[in-house]
Image (spheres, rainbow, N blue to C red):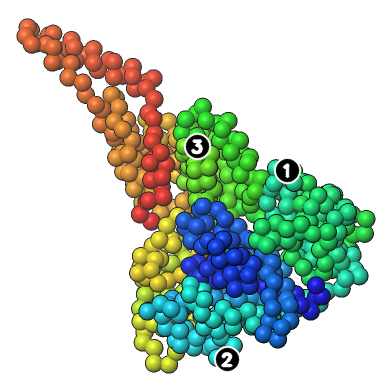
Amino acid sequence: MPQTHIRNFCIIAHIDHGKSTLADRLLQNTGTIESNNMVEQLLDSMDLERERGITIKAQAVRMKYTSNAKNNYQLNLIDTPGHVDFSYEVSRSLAACEGALLVVDSTQGIQAQTMANVLLALDNGLEIIPIVNKIDLDVADPERISEEIQKTFGFLESEIIFASAKDGRGIDNILEAIVKRIPCPEESEDLPLQALIFDAKYDPYKGVIAYVRVYQGSLDISSRIQIMSTKIEGDCLEIGYFNPNPTKLNKLETGEVGYIATGLKNITNAPVGDTITLAGNPANKPLPGYMPLKPMVFAGFYPADGEDYLSLRDAIEKLKLNDAALSYQLETSMALGNGFRCGFLGLLHMDIVQERLEREYGINLIATSPSVAYEIELKDASSYYIDNPAQLPELTEIQSINEPWLNLRVLTPMSYIGGVMELIKSRRGVYKNMDYLNSASGDSNSTARALIDCEIPLSEVLIDFYDQLKAISQGYASMDYSLLDYRQGHLIKLDILVGGDIVDALSIIVHKDKSYQFGRSLVSTLKDLIPRQLFEVPVQATIGNKIIARETIKALRKNVLAKCYGGDITRKRKLLQQQAEGKKRMKKVGRVDIPQEAFLSILKLNR
């Protein structure tokens, strides 16, 4: 097909604004999927995606469309993840397109993630088609949302399309707008091949399958390819496009979107954002924008039963084949035995990996509290990063501890500004500025909204910040963040001792001002969670050699006098003395088993 009749576009939206449903309607209206084969959220193929109503993995599908002017077009839709954890994948999907459908829920309006994605799209020079979705709902207010879009992003009223992805209203207008308003690809066919990898998955028979957009040149089935950042070469075992099932081709032309089965055995050999070129005639330079994925959140995964260690190792290895963002390494804990220290893009990514390991591979996991990577500067001028509090060196060796900070944007109704600002302040956030969204004329303060811009440590956002934000704003506020830099903080390691032994999996790095509150709260929680033993168990929070909080789990007492129904008092004393000596011996050799709830207790601390 000539480039003038190709349209590459994606759909950007906040979570639950109807992105996947709109993709379903586009597939149905173009005849790509027959109505009797149609299922909801067709492009969300994972069970987790369907259950949670989110897109985790990007998908690409080719549609054929005949316009009102009777011209035939090839429409390539790239369905992108909507969560902030996967913002890099979104940026690469946007880079593969010339246009984007901006979907805004007519009941909720613009959200923080919507604004972030629009800015990403504008940075990539995309033509944006704004769509007000869900106009079929009784509580919809499309006119107000339309005016909000116009005043926030500068669109004209005539550019906005009103639609309902659920009942099909406005879908024909969207298809016509795609072919009329989104520009066609304009790359050269004569230059050496440059193909952008915007996603990849692993197939046990075909190796790594790279989802690509061909920028210049062309690729046929006999070509030998090269990954530009790794210089690894491979053969084209198969090329084709998704319809939405894989459909084989002999050639991918300039401007087209499709897939390449590379035969590579490791997904890290073809990373997202990299460039594929021909081994015999390579391009001079790769496409811009590629950067290696860096995990931001770290946690330890241990099998609840030590005998499941090998099963857990095999499961993580298999999961890693399809998830290049997941990193892991062997870790041994005195309290939990052998396990793995895993790195994730964010909390949602961690939650998904944990649930997949438990559900798909049947492994009962113990997950430690998530932490971030800290930069440790030593007094000998050297520095390195740690992702586990147990790796922190002695305080006497440390010059400073630097922690990652975020640029955080919170979009909230005006009436909740005070509560949101208080939350940000309590988490060591630094306020920068506040913008008021250009709300429709006549709006009351209950519907007008403000965008709060601030800087905040990642560790403070990690655990329950989002839940607190939703609670304070009654569910109306939304947030988006991006990594800023590393800054020096007054941080210390808080250790927990159970029965006199340090439980390394419960160690956390906290700000000094909050250390006593954390220690007091944690030992109090652990006292209720750890089962009572036949001997007294002290639970202590320490900073270095200083104990800052202590609770004691009382001993279970067996009534040894029950059988002593008579005789002299010395008989009772003898039995009680034997019991006391037995408890002393047991305290020396007794082992306290700590339940999974104890490790999760850090997540529920009052911050």
The amino acid type of the residue labelled 3 equals Ile
Residue 149 can be seen, yes or no: yes
Label 3 or label 2, whichever lies nearer to me, is: 2
On residue 89, the disc is none
Front-lying residue, 291 or 592: 291
Left or right, 204 with reference to 190: left
Front-lying residue, 584 or 120: 120
The amino acid type of the residue labelled 1 equals Tyr
On residue 363, the disc is 3
Q: Which residue is mark 1?
A: 205
On residue 158, the disc is 2
Percent x, y for residue 320?
64, 45
Q: Earlier in the sequence, mark 2 or mark 1?
A: 2
Label 2 or label 1, whichever lies nearer to me, is: 1
Which residue occupies 68% across, 69% down?
Answer: 63
The N terminus: image quadrant? bottom right
Residue 199: image quadrant is: bottom right
Which residue occupies 48% across, 67% down?
Answer: 16
The C terminus: image quadrant? bottom left
Residue 546: image quadrant is: top left
Secondary structure at numbered mark 3 = loop
